[in-house]
Amino acid sequence: MKHFINSKLPNTGETIFTVMTVLSAKHHAINLGQGSPDFETDERLIDLVYKAMKDGHNQYAHKNGLLALRESIAEKVDFLYNAAVNPATEITITPGGTYAIYTALTSILRKGDEVIVFEPAYDSYVPNIEVNGAIPVLIPMLYPDYEIDWSLVKQKISPATKMIMLNSPHNPTGRILNKDDIEQLKKIVEGTDILILSDEVYEHIIFDGLEHQSILRYPELFQRSFVTFSFGKVYHCTGWKMGYCIAPDWLMKEFSKVHQYNSFSSNTPLQYALAAFLKNKNEYLKLGQFFQNKKDHFQKLMAETKFKPLASYGSYFQLYSFGDISNESELNFAKKLTLEAGVASIPVSAFYQNGKDNKVLRFCLAKKESTLNEAVERLLHYYKKTGE
């Protein structure tokens, strides 16, 4: 029997994260590629999970999530952004932020719809759009500062434009939206039916005393938006795959229709634990400085190398240019560093559909200082040995 399907994602294979992680493990490299912390989750949070399990909270939660957790999220949103969201109808707990993004897109996209995506872009965006029969309209951010060219966005708007996707703090660049970006966005969508999907999983990881411009701050934008978040990025537990989506009631109704036939609900004991732990404001308020210290430490170490840092204002990541070191492609250079220097990174070209190559690598800062120290020591030893 001949097995054949007309693939919905014919150009999709293993993600670059899988490729580099496998390569890193095989060659015992330090993995600064994947955005995964190598330090532990707070024991108090783990104890709360254990308590929830022992207390018998092991069956399905409500499909929208434990109400106590949704109420804790609503309190946080009001505290941070002076925004009132209804925990009963405008918040859904999801198995991860990426799931929330997929569900939001699937709930509203139809064949032929266009979605504006800024590149470099997190790798799930384009496949999520295409699997729904919609068309990604790719707009490059302006290298090396990765600013958004809003005049180009205006040119790309068409009668088929269904949505604009945003990501701030941005993966992989670390760029954040500012107030001018928000004003430009407002002007573009005003008087249209264009929706917004705002990926804000790194909302608390902002550097240099800057302010996160959440879509939740702007009622006129929120009323047309899905906004997605991740507990894994806040509490150093990415493997728990816990996130949530906030959207106005009319959009959340559509989100819920898809969600109820997919995962239906999310891990119950984790929700009980998170509902309690989220009350500790300092745990998320201190994240910016926590990662700022790591960024500053890593930059100080890397200053001894020929790598050149690009501006980063948030997220787990720091981009470095290697144009003064090699003319190799980003992918080949990243593989070379993994095999020969013992340090894994991610080529930023992997975040472009056309593989645009600016000679830039992404390094993850969410590591112990000892890990960052050893990684840079390996790079220095490698270049000292090779004389490059």
Image (cartoon, helix red, strand yellow):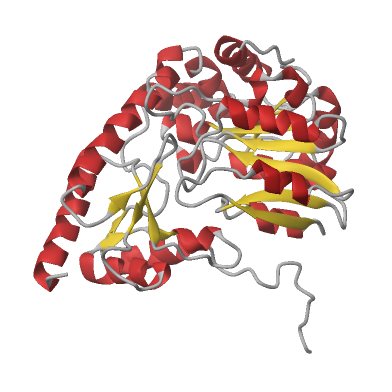
Residue nearer the viewer, 242 or 116: 116
Residue under the image location 54 percent in, 43 percent down: 147
Q: Relative to 243, is 256 on the left or the right? A: right
Q: Quarter-wise, where is residue 67 in the image?
A: top right
Farthest residue toward the bottom?
1
Quarter of the image that includes the C terminus: bottom left
What x and y, as percent, mark residue 32? 33, 52
Q: Relative to 87, is 149 on the left or the right? A: left
* Residue 215 visible (yes or no): yes
Residue nearer the viewer, 111 or 245: 111
Residue nearer the viewer, 331 or 229: 331
Label total for image: 0
Q: Quarter-wise, where is residue 44 in the image?
A: top left
What x and y, as percent, mark residue 148? 59, 43
Residue under the image location 56 percent in, 21 percent down: 272
What x and y, as percent, mark residue 190? 82, 29
Quarter of the image that includes the N terminus: bottom right
Residue nearer the viewer, 44 or 207: 207
Residue under the image location 60 percent in, 28 percent down: 180
Q: Relative to 351, is 93 on the left or the right? A: right
* Residue 262 visible (yes or no): no
Give the answer, above or below, for where 271 lies relative to 5. Answer: above
What x and y, as percent, mark residue 112? 87, 57
